[in-house]
Amino acid sequence: MKLQQYINSFNDALRAEDSRALVRLLDCRNKTARGLSDTVGPIDERRLQNPGHSLPEPWDAIALRHCACVHDMYHNRYPSAYNHQTALLSLYYRWLVDQSSWALPALFVLLRDLRDLAEQADAETYTAEGKMPALEECTRTVSKAFSLCATDRTFKGAESRRNGVYHVACLSIKCYFKVGKPNLCKNIIRAVTSDPKTPPISEAPITDQVTWHFYIGMLAFLNGEDNKADQELTWALEHCPASAKRNQELILTYLIPLHLLRGSLPTPALISQHPRLQLLFSPFLDALKSGNVRAYDERLEWAQPRLVGMSVYLTVERAREVCLRGLFKKAWIASDKSTRMPIETFRIALALHGVEVDADEVECMVANMVFRGYMKGYISHEKQTVVLGKTNAFPSLSSITR
């Protein structure tokens, strides 16, 4: 497609408010974009500053910026392509303030491509300090899009740009996580949830609903709000399309550690669908089932780098207490469920599983179990005995909330 032919293609899309046609013309990763890269060639700065007047303002400039962007992108000049895409979005925002929701699909595609180009640009200019200047600037550009959607007072109902709030909010949150500033996510979430004019999440496309619930759940997970995280992530998993295996894996990355804390283990059928998670978590699951504390500790040490990178290490480490509880419960059952258990019995149980600790350390473990509600009773320090309740000495893990 030649340049003038491409520019003229916008006339019908803009006149008919055809969102599909507009997306096709502005997508950086389709056949149209590759064709432009091959046939139009580079566009000099002089032409970019004087784009002409074939289309309504500012569409001549937008069309030229897109051509310049895809030419640089397909020639692996990502920093330059990113700069062109940023300039394009600035122009698009000027136009968007007077448009209804029909312009949202093109906005989403432009923002998606901007984020991808920012990551590729930063990969080329990566510094020893690990800074990501393009992606950090990208977060600010995405935030402007969020404001344009969230503050729409011109259009109502299905025509309101507010219908794009959840999609852009999720992209903002994703960018904040990528640049290591998850604390800023709360500002986005507050802006969405505190505005009574924001449409309910149930009215958003299902893909945006799943992404929104995932991020709310992940943030709750990182803040130690286990129950809220479990609810949000479970909803996201149950409504995630069956074909979206990678998204399911991301949800399960946080949901499995939460369930380890409750002793509620994923079924073999579920975890077998995700080989990477199966490789990582199966030894933990086996250790929890058998109460093998030593095996759990060995796996925790082996998997620490990856668990830290996934931000789930502390939760998996906390689940070690569930493994310890399982071992202590087995010792209790082997002692005919006695209400008076010598601490030495628990020490022997640990020793049989290869964990050598002295009596004082075992007493500390038991005290911690009682404090966290994993065991009901108290310790008689003088007699070195644990006095357990006659009923419900080891409450179900599901009843222990956080």
Image (cartoon, rainbow, N blue to C red):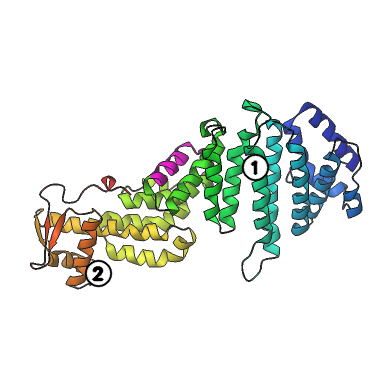
Q: Nearer the viewer, residue 48 or 312?
A: 48
Q: Which residue is mark 2?
A: 355
Percent of width and height locating residue 258:
37, 50
**Residue drawn at (54%, 30%) of the image:** 203
Q: Is residue 225 above or below residue 203?
A: below
> Is 327 part of what is drawn in magenta?
no
Mark 2 is surrounded, within 10 Å at the Cα level, by few (under 14), some (14 to 19) or many (20 or more) other residues, namely some
**Residue drawn at (67%, 66%) of the image:** 126
Task: Using residue 379 as the reference point, say whether residue 237 is left or right of it.
Answer: right
Q: Which residue is mark 1?
A: 147
> Is 230 part of what is drawn in magenta?
yes
Mark 2 and mark 1 lie on one chain; the one further toward the N terminus is: 1
Residue interval drawn in magenta: 228-243
Task: Using residue 257 as the reference point, say whether residue 97 is left or right of it.
Answer: right
What is the CA distance from the residue labelled 2 to the residue labelled 1?
Answer: 57 Å
Percent of width and height locating residue 324:
25, 60
Position of the N terminus, as image quadrant, is top right
Asked whether disc 2 touches disc 1, contact meaning CB atoms under 8 Å apart, the reply is no
